[in-house]
């Protein structure tokens, strides 16, 4: 598969000038993830976007994000959930530090209980902490 790095580079120039979105931990947003290297999760379509979950907010500008996929996944590196009759997987192993300028539009927010479950699944990957 040929990756479109040139068009992503042009799109990043536009994203840089975007206003920052207001976001919270546990939110799920469409985000401009871009074109990435190897097996890293890429954004899709001409906006290079993918849904992400905001795991940890550090300030109004940056946060840790976990990409979300509709592909069926199982195992300790994924947190699966169902919403509106569709199954999704949060890619726990693909955590990324992102800037809020990448956020496009909010989809929904996880409940406090769901956020705790996701955080516990993520922490289980980090036995050294």
Image (cartoon, helix red, strand yellow):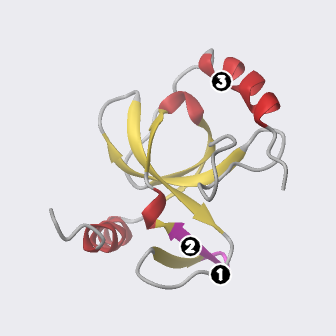
State yes or no: discs 1 and 2 in contact (Cβ < 8 Å).
yes
Residue, disc 2:
89
Q: Is residue 21 visible?
A: no
Instruction: Report, in whole angstroms, how far the alpha carbon at label 1 lies from the one at label 2.
Output: 7 Å
SS at circle 2: strand
- Residue 17: percent from left, percent from top: 63, 14
Would you place residue 98 above or below residue 29 in this image?
above
- Residue 113: percent from left, percent from top: 32, 72
Q: Residue at x 41, y 55 (%)?
A: 26
Identify the mark nearer the N-term, 2 or 3.
3
The segment highlighted magenta reads 83-90
Q: Is residue 100 visible?
A: yes
Location of residue 36 (image quadrant): top right
Residue 88 within the magenta-colored segment of the rendering: yes
SS at circle 1: loop
Identify the mark nearer the N-term, 1 or 3.
3
Q: Which mark is residue 15?
A: 3
Instruction: Report, in whole angstroms, how far the alpha carbon at label 1 lies from the one at label 3.
Output: 30 Å
Q: Quadrant of the C terminus?
A: bottom left
49 or 60: nearer the viewer: 49
Location of residue 10 (image quadrant): top right
- Residue 67: percent from left, percent from top: 55, 57
Is residue 36 rendered to the left or right of residue 116?
right
Residue, disc 1:
72
32 or 82: nearer the viewer: 32
Would you place residue 65 above or below residue 101 in this image?
below
């Amino acid at each position: 598969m040929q990756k479109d790095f040139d068009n992503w580079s042009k799109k990043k120039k536009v994203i840089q000038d975007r206003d920052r979105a207001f976001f919270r931990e546990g939110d799920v947003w469409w985000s401009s993830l871009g074109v990435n290297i190897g097996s890293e999760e890429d954004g899709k379509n001409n906006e290079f976007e993918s849904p992400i979950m905001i795991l940890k907010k550090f300030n109004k500008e940056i946060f840790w994000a976990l990409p979300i996929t509709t592909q069926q996944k199982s195992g300790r590196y994924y947190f699966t959930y169902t919403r509106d009759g569709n199954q999704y997987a949060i890619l726990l192993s693909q955590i990324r530090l992102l800037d809020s300028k990448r956020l496009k539009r909010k989809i929904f927010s996880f409940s406090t209980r769901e956020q705790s479950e996701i955080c516990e699944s993520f922490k289980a990957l980090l036995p050294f902490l």
